[in-house]
Image (cartoon, rainbow, N blue to C red):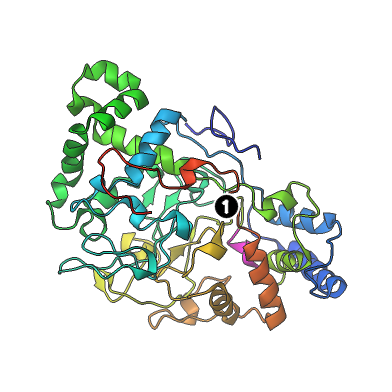
Amino acid sequence: MNQAPGEGAGPARGRGRAAVATLRWMGLLLGAAVLHGCGGDSGTTPQPEPDLRALALQAGLAPLPSEPVRPQENPYDPARTELGHLLFFDPIMSGPRDVACSTCHLPRFAFADGRQFPSGAGATGLGPERTLPGPPPLREMPRNSPPMFNIGLYGRGSPTPTTNGTMFWSGSAFGLEDQVLNPIAADNELRGTTYAKPVAVDSVLARLRTIPEYVARFEAAFPDVAAVAQGDPGVLVSHTTLRLALAAYIRELVTPDAPLDRFLRGDDQALDNREREGLALFVGKAGCVNCHTGPVLSDFTMHVIGGGQAGLGRDTTPGDDLGWGEHGGTPYSFRTAPLRQVALTAPYLHAGTEATLAELLDFKNRGVSEHPNVTSAQLSPMVRPLGLTPAELEALETFLGALTDPLEDAGPLFDAPASVPSGLEIPR
């Protein structure tokens, strides 16, 4: 049972689909008017743009809710959220005890890692300076590390937030609770070669049960389970309570106070002239809103866009990556990337082949496949040459910066804790 955004107690910060032909026509006219009237001067005081706001809302954009959608089995609870916060940053979760979830999702890199491919167990350092894993079979991961923001507002086959949103580039899992333990068992993520895959999660649970502070925190986070366990950590610290705690923390990483949100809520001063030019292009001539729509700026469906391939590829297809095709869907299709905080999360696309936003926009503007196994006929209908000028590309890039919440009042969940119960060094 899904809970509507904003329902229930939570740490509030106080703060359809593709454009049809008429909207595209309106966007072209409005974009031309904005470009003509503003002259690209981002220092000029913006004037009210009710037509642009109405166009953006009608095209499917929406301000981000201040709270996630929470499943009935995992309601907001501060003790549970803080437990998940500690677990996320604690290397006790990895086989070699030197890799945490945060190793590939660092707060200083907007909960990504600034690398083309993440480097898990068997590597040292953090961010772009992290080494390659070794020895074999340890290896880099085959896909770019996605940021962790707003997962609690992901959709599934639509931009509408749900509790079982589409996870991962390939759409291979649905909902946080469904996937949050998977990295523990992956040798190139957290497991390494310390223990076998079938016993990976049980091995981590056994460690947690020996740490008194963790046992006490599980009791506080799951009092109903603690009542049944009657002091038995083997009952209290389980697959279920571990996945619920981790998911509870990640779900709270919501970023609802970007300039775009303030503009869509009625603040005419939230976007400057160049950002408004970019927004007009986004919902008009560039057609970005055809896929990047809704509050998280993704339709959460799969598209073949012809992004280049790099890295080791998947174990089933060395040197290549079929995306959703690996799971029976359209080959080389990937989930539309959410754009929240996108200016902070380079590099881009499933294989990190576009190093900057400018390179990403150039790729989208060309509208051709850069994958040798993807022909023009296989590309999704929205992929086409856009004919954007350098000035228009710059305006779009500036607008994408307006999707960043500065997190000025985000609170401690958006940073590493001071310490973790294991006493291990925190990747931060």
Q: Is residue 269 left or right of residue 179?
A: right
Q: Position of residue 159 (x, y in %)?
A: 56, 51
Q: Quadrant of residue 242?
A: top left
Is 244 rendered above or below residue 333? above
At x 83%, y 61%, the residue is 46
Image: magenta residue range: 287-292
Q: Is residue 401 left or right of residue 124?
A: right
Question: How many circles with numbers are drawn on the protein?
Answer: 1
Is 162 rendered above or below residue 45? above
Say which residue label 1 marks: 296
**Residue 103 within the segment the image draws in magenta:** no
Q: Position of residue 247 (x, y in %)?
A: 39, 40
Front one among 404 and 142: 404
At x 25%, y 40%, the residue is 422
Which quadrant, please, contains the C terminus? Answer: bottom left
Q: Is residue 71 left or right of residue 182?
A: right
**Residue 290 within the segment the image draws in magenta:** yes
Q: Position of residue 342 (x, y in %)?
A: 55, 62
- Specify the amino acid type for callout 1: Val
